[in-house]
Structures are given as C-alpha cells and as structure tokens.
Image (tube, coloured by chain):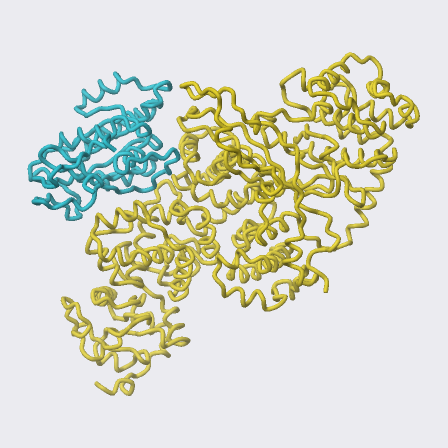
Chain colours: A cyan, B yellow
Amino acid sequence: MASRGTAQRPNGTQGKICQFKLVLLGESAVGKSSLVLRFVKGQFHEYQESTIGAAFLTQTVCLEETTVKFEIWDTAGQERYHSLAPMYYRGAQAAIVVYDITNQDTFTRATTWVKELQRQASPSIVIALAGNKADLGNKRVVEYEEAQAYAEENGLLFMETSAKTAMNVNDIFLAIAKKLPKNEQTGNAGTSGQGRRLVESEGQKPTSGNCCK
Amino acid sequence: MSPALLENEERCFGGMTFFAQSHPAELCGSNGLPLTPNSITILGKSQFLKTINHPNLCSYLDIIRSKHERTIVVAEYCGKPLASLENLSVDKVIRIAYQCLVGLKYMNKFGLVHSHLSPENILIDKNGTVKLFNFGLYYMTDHGKNVSFPIGYPKYTAPEIFLSSGMRSVKVDSWSLGMIIAECLLGCTLWPGYKLSQSLRKVLSLVHTENSIFERISRENNCFNIYEDLPEDVRAFVNDCLQIYPSQRKTPETLLELPIFQEFLKKDDQDRENSLYENVIQRKMDELYYLWQLAGGDMTIELKRQGLIRSRPPILTIPNLVILLGQMFGRRDIAGLLDLRVVKVSLELLSQRLSHIPYVANYPRLSNHTYAQEPNDLTDTASQLPLIIRERDTEYQFYRIVLFNRLLQIYPITKDAIKREAHKDIPPPVRGAIWAALLGVSGDIQTKYDMIDKETPTHTDRQIEVDIPRCHQYSELLSSGAGHERLQRLLKAWVRDNPHYVYWQGLDSLTAPFLFLNFNNEARAFACLSAFIPKYLHKFFLKDNSAIIQEYLSKFSQIITFHDPQLANHLKSITFVPELFAIPWFLTMFSHVFPIHKILHLWDKLLLGDSSFPLFVGLAILKQLRDFLLASGFNECILLFSDLPEIDIELCVKDSMSMYQKTPSSITYRKHQYDQSKAANWNEPEVGTEKIPRISVEDLIYLVENSPDKVLVVDLRNNIQYERGAIAGSINIPFTSVQLAQDRITSLGPQATPLSENKDRIVVVIGPNDQNSALFAEFLIGCQVFGVCSLQGGIYALRSKASNLLLPARKEKGFF
C-alpha cells in the first residue's frame, strides 16, 4: 500500500483541507472507472462493468501543506451520454481526459473532450490527459511523443497510466492536486451547487478517504 | 398407489469428468483481457448439446465447471455398453448398427461429429434400444482444441485422423462404426493386448490394403471362417464403412440407404405413426435431473465417492521446472488425460422423494383450458413459504413444473392462467418460456429472428464489442465465447430491427437476463427483448431520450414524495436528485444494478406489472437505505449509490408489489408511457413543475365508491361553495385560510386532524384552481403528510363526471 501516494500525515493534524471536484471524461472502455477504482480503492477488475450515467467517489491526497479531497465524477463514455456530461463537468476544478494508447480513435475523442472543456468548463480548470492501458505497450498505436506534444500545446498535464499495474495512477492525481490553486477563493469558487466548501479545520479528520484511516 | 415416476425406469444419470487445457499463466488476449479459461469456453459451447434430443442419443443434462479447469459432464445413461455384451447374433448386431447410424445421422444434421465412438459408449437397454453416449465430446472441446488429450479410441480411429490435423468429417464415425461392428460380427477383440503405439501402427498399416479391409482384419485375427459365413449384404455394409479414402467412404446418412437397413426404416416409420396417439407422459430427463438435484443429488459428490475426483497432494501438481515467462515443464500430473470411466447414478433418490405422489399428478386438471386447478392444496399452503424455500422443495417444484408445462403446451389460450400462476412463483426450469408467455411472445419467432441481418458491420459495433466483455461476466455462461457471440448477435439484431432506436450503453445488461434464460433459444431471447422494451422502456432508446428520462425521473420524485414525504424532503434539502443515481436503474430496469440471480426474481414480478412498476422498485430500494439516507449529506448519499450495498431482493419485490397495488394507476401516468389508452386526455403540467402527482377523476370516484376508508379528500373551496355540494366525508380547508409559510398541520385548525394522523390513506386535494391545489399539496408535503395528490382538473372535472358524488355538506360536518 506504500505505493498509494497518499501518505498519512504523521501527526494527524494539518492546516487546510481543500475539496475539489474532478471529472473523468473519455471514450468508453478506455479505463476511466478502472483509474478511479485503482486510485480510490487500490483495486483493479479485469471486467469492470460499464458506467451508465455517472458514478461518484471520493479520495483524499495529502500534500505538504494541505490535504486535497477529490470528489470524483466518473462519467459514461458512450458518445450518446454526452448530453449528460455538462451536468458533471460544470463547476469542476479538474478533469482527467482519458484515452487508450492502443486505440487511435480514443485519442481523437480525447482531443474533442479537451476542446469542449476549454470552451465550456470553468476557465481555470486543470486538465490532465491520461494515456491509459500503458501495460499493453506492445499494442501501442498512439505514440507517447504525439500525445505529449499535444498536451504541451494545450497546457495539459500528461502521463501514460496503467490502471492494471497502477503505474502513474496516483501520480496523475497528485500532479493535479499540486497544480490546483489552494487559496481559499479559488478553492471555493465554482464548486457544485451542493454546498461544497473549503473546510478550514484544526485536527479534524476528513470524513472519508482511505488515507486517513 | 402408483408413483409419479414410472416404475420401470431404466434411465439413470451418467457422470464423467476431464480437465480442460489450462492457459499459460498471465497470458492476455488482444484486448488486454485475460484469456477465457478453456473450461468456460467448453461450458458455453456445450450448452447447445442440451438441445439435442433423439431416441438414439443420450441427452446432455448438465455441464459443471469445477476447480482447476475440471469439467464434469452429466448425461442420460441407459442400459449397458455394447462392450459388455457377448455372443450377439448377426441380426442383433445389424439392428445395433442401424440404430447407431440413425443417431449419427441425426447429430450430423447439426454438424456434430462423434469422433469418440467405441463399444463403451454405445449403450443398449432391455428393449434393445441403442443410445450413443458422450457424442458431443469432440464438439464441446472445439474439435479437441480445448483439451490436451486426443479424442477417439486409437483402435477405432479412422486413419486419416492420424495423417492430417484438419477438421474431422462425419465419415470418421462411419469408419469407427465399421470397426466396432466388425469386432462384434467376428466375435473377437481385435489386436488384443496391443499397446497404444502398436494399435496405432496397425491402423495405419491398413492404409495399404488393396482389397477388403474387413477381410484382412478377419484373417489377421484368425476368424476368416466367421467372415466367410457372414451374409453378403452384411459384409458389404462393413466394407462400405471401412474404406481407406474418405472420398469413397459413405456417410452415416448414405449408409442408411443400403438395402440391408430398408426393413428397419419401414418399421420405424410405422412405429412412429402408431405412437402418435399414445400419450403417456414420461417426465423429461432434464426435469428429472433438476428435481434430483433439489432432492440432494450432486454429481460432483458422486464422482468423488467413486474415486473419479480425487484430491491429490499439492506437491504432486508442482511442475519440475517453471521458467520466468511462466511456461511449465515436467508436470507430473496425469490429469491431462481423458478418464474413460463413467459413474452411473440411479434415480432412486428422486423416486423415493416422490414416491407418495400418484402418477395422475402428471396430468393436472385444466378446466376451460384456462383455469388451472390445484391437484391438492399442497401447493397452496406451500406458496405461503418464502420463495427461497419453495424453490428448493422437490415436491413443490414437481407440481409447479408439471402444471406450467401443461399450461405452456396450449399457450397462448392459457395466457391468463399462466399469469395467475406466475403471481405465486415461477419454477426456474420453465422461467424462459413463462417470461415469453407473460410478454405475449407467440408465432414464428424463429423465422423472424433468422430474417434479421446480424452480420453487416454498423457504427455501433465498436460500442457493442467493448461492452460485451464487461457485461455480467461473473456468470460463466455469459463470459464464455458462446455467450459473447450470442449477446452480440442479439444486440446487433435489435439495433437492426429498431431503426428508430439506437444502442445505448445498458442495452447489453438489459439483454443479458433474456439470453441467460434462453441460452439455446436466441430467437426467444430476442422476441422477449423486443416485447419488453416497448412495454417498459417505451422511447427510452431514442437517440434523444432526454425528455423521456426526465419525465420518468420526475415521476419517480413524485412517487417518492407521495409514499415517503419525509425522505423526499430530506433528499430535496441536500439537492440529491434521481438524475444522479437512478438513470442506470430505470434505463436497464435494474439489470445493470443487480446480479442475474436477483434480476430473475425481480423481473418475475416486474413482468406482471405495467411500466410504472419499476418506479416502485426504485422506491423499495430507497426504503431499504432509508435510515442511512436520512442521516446523511449529499456526499455520503451519492457514495452509497456508487457502491450500492446488498439489497434484500425478496423484501424489495414484496415492498414494490405492495406499494404498486396501493397506488392508483393515474398517479403514475406519463405522457410517454406505452399504453396511452388511460393516459389520453391527460394534461400534466410541464415536467418537473409539480412535486406531487395528480390523480384522475375516475380513480377518485373508484376510491370514494369502493374503499372510502382509503381516501381522504381535502376540499380547498370556500365554505359557501363547499356546503353547496362536496364529497361525503371530505374536509374543507379554504385555501385562503392556509398560511403556507407554516410547516405544521395544526396551523390548519381542528378539522385537519385526520391529515396529521394519516398513515395510509390517499389524500386528494381538490381545488377550483390547479395552482392553489399544487401549493397546498406542497404545504402538506412540508408537513410530511403521506399519500398526497391533487385531483386532475379540480372540482370542475369532478362536477362534470360525477356530480352525483357531490352532496350538500351541511349535515356532514356539524362542527361548523
């Protein structure tokens, strides 16, 4: 479990807990749900069932100064569920757009998601591009350099990940956590209408998130 | 007293077992998923064999997958193997050959090649009837590819099998039969005591025979004198079988055309005609096997008892060498070989259990063809027991299966009776057929299904392809190759057959239960799906279905409010809307939410209700989570649904049924529902604007006239209008007197006491003005009053349709 990257704070106290809404987007069967499952529960299911509508999970990441709690919306990948997507990415402070390195179409689809986010989502949104299924290197179709160049052009975080081997899964969430602004105002702005707030707490444990158990 | 099963039962169950070849560890398929274990591939493929029923073939009953890639095959076993019979007359041998050929011809029709014929698996019963046992081994192992042992007895194997690795034709069976029959006719064992390699060499040496192979064999085995005494046509038959070149060898079908068999054929035709009018019910083997299992039978245990399954010290299964890539060498395990032993298990256990049931129980009485009378009151009292117990009760299941089979025989005229019986429960073995009946499936569904193009590539293919390998994959059947192929065909067929609809993710889950139940009857699975979707998911699969889903979810919110205002208020206060969790529920009718075994019980009842039933299922699920939801905030609630806890499905079904029955149907009217007959003239305000449902005048009239104790009418008009004419027993609360800002019923004054005490009466708000009615109803919800709805059309509708119900109210309410 040492590889989870969500190390527990030794004394159990911390300065700030920031909550961020993060949304996962991408073509179906690229591994969105698997990434989340790996990140949140450290599990991997070969036959992860498809997501209909959306699923919601939370996980906490501890940085040096702050504790970041992600509220993760894992969306359905099928193009038809597109109309539901804005409901989930509205007010999101971060997004991971996922593609499958063994399938060129999923990369193309990822680029359209990025465009849509840049156009429609909150302007300060942190977008990460994840080339998933990196464990299937021998079936690679999308070159690392191609995706990296695209990510740089568009100011995205980029990593190739593998939900199966856990490669870079925590890292990509950690990188997002680091890049997200932690001051009170941005942390608070645009949170979903569910009364999300930035919690200032002394010694209060985050309500959920495995890292603090 | 005569028992339910015929006494002269010679049939029994035969069990055998072998290991599928295991894949090298960690090997993945092209999609990155692990390879399907061969035992699962075998399981899926062998399902088809269960559909092969013929008097000369032993029916397959079950294929069980056990630990370490072990496959257990259960089939009918009848009589004694040919190998155990001695000194057979030539006539008897020919009669046996004839029946073997008839069996082979029948299986060849389905593209099945036996390839495993031997005197051990040609069974002959007391009456001389021949049945071929284990005829599907070659087929179920995908032509032997999924097992590490060769298929076929070396001595009886056609020479071309040793010389090429291609697919075996039906002619290999002609050869094997020829060898077997030759042995019988010559009355000796060919090449006795030969080792495997020697008999193999013997078979191959025959390739160079120039004349009759039969003659050569007889000379080699010192029985040429017997050969010489055989009738000419018998020798000709064996020679036709034993042709070296497959091109010159006859198939089982053409062998049957030989003159020697013509008399048998004629007699068979006659027998068939004569038996047409004999109607002795003999329970089918698959039913008996099912009941035998209920009675405690277990083939795995039988195989263990007889030593066919033996646990071995683990050390013996460790290979000598494993290289880093995972390949293994020197396995000291002989499990890869085929164990030829067959365990016979008699029906004794079952006969004992059913011994006190009279034979006539096989004939349930049906009067008027539509009404089923219970053979005795056993099933009635038993139907009070929990479903789980009923489903495991041998006797109860016997009665139910007999009854349903009878009803199905003359479906569709028994449609109503089937429906009535299905309300009690549905026995698992007939569930597929019963569901089809409940959905009104009839006619030539096979032709219709065959006509649909399931091959041409479409844009949806990729989506279907990625969805199938993750659809209910815990199920061995659905995760097998055969399962994937069938599901794909069904989905493609549906998309093709419904051009106005599109494939939405979730359709795969929705199709899965139908495929699961009708694994060997795709046409019926398809017909069920095609009937199910319009009935329960009308327009849900439109390309733009947002209006339909929105309406459905908004109706769901109304139903929550109607039945559980406290929960509705809480969910509203944390902005926890059904859009966040209920889309997969309703779009897939819960098939994406529950495992198959739960879906089956849920849908058993769902199919008896209309398209509003699922709303109550949703409500019943919420009810089980109620305490947690009420105590939780938004995040906890949504987390709960992302990882739904175990739901007690029997309780869920019971709750949904009771709420469904308590709710007048107009409460659930939707503009987009399939059956518009009732919803006609229904002017619902725009979706989402009213939080409480409306009730139709007809439903109100029905309630007032038939069960006045179940309804509480609140009249919002002013006193004067009210006293002129109102529904007897109604309460008058003039709207102008209501302080909407309040949240306590007591603020309405003493006449509102029945409202605050209301537990299960339906509260109908009647006003002169829809808007005010809605406002007042919402006020009641705020006060957590159960069962609130407003009258569609208000007082005017009531006046025009049932003015007789409006009585001068002065006397009724003396306290004014």
- Is residue B580 found left or right of B512 in the rendered image? left
- Is residue B250 found left or right of B522 in the rendered image? right
Task: Please say if B367 is above or below A124.
Answer: below
Q: Quadrant of residue A46?
A: top left
Name the residue rendered at 50%, 45% in the picture: B514
User: Which quadrant, please, contains the N terminus of chain B?
Assistant: bottom right
Would residue B796 be seen by someone viewing this image from the given angle?
A: no
> Along the line of sight, which residue is nearer the eye, B141 or B488?
B141
The image position of residue B452, as x and y in percent, is: 54, 36
Would residue A56 be seen by someone viewing this image from the given angle?
A: yes
The image position of residue B219, as x and y in percent, is: 86, 18
> Along the line of sight, which residue is nearer the eye, A58 or B215?
B215
Name the residue rendered at 23%, 31% in the picture: A2
- Is residue B586 found left or right of B526 in the rendered image? left
- Is residue B780 found left or right of B705 in the rendered image? left
Task: Please say if B631 is above or below B376.
Answer: above
> Along the line of sight, which residue is nearer the eye, B22 or B268?
B22
The image position of residue B10, as x and y in percent, is: 73, 48
Name the residue rendered at 39%, 49% in the picture: B590
Name the residue rendered at 57%, 29% in the picture: B335
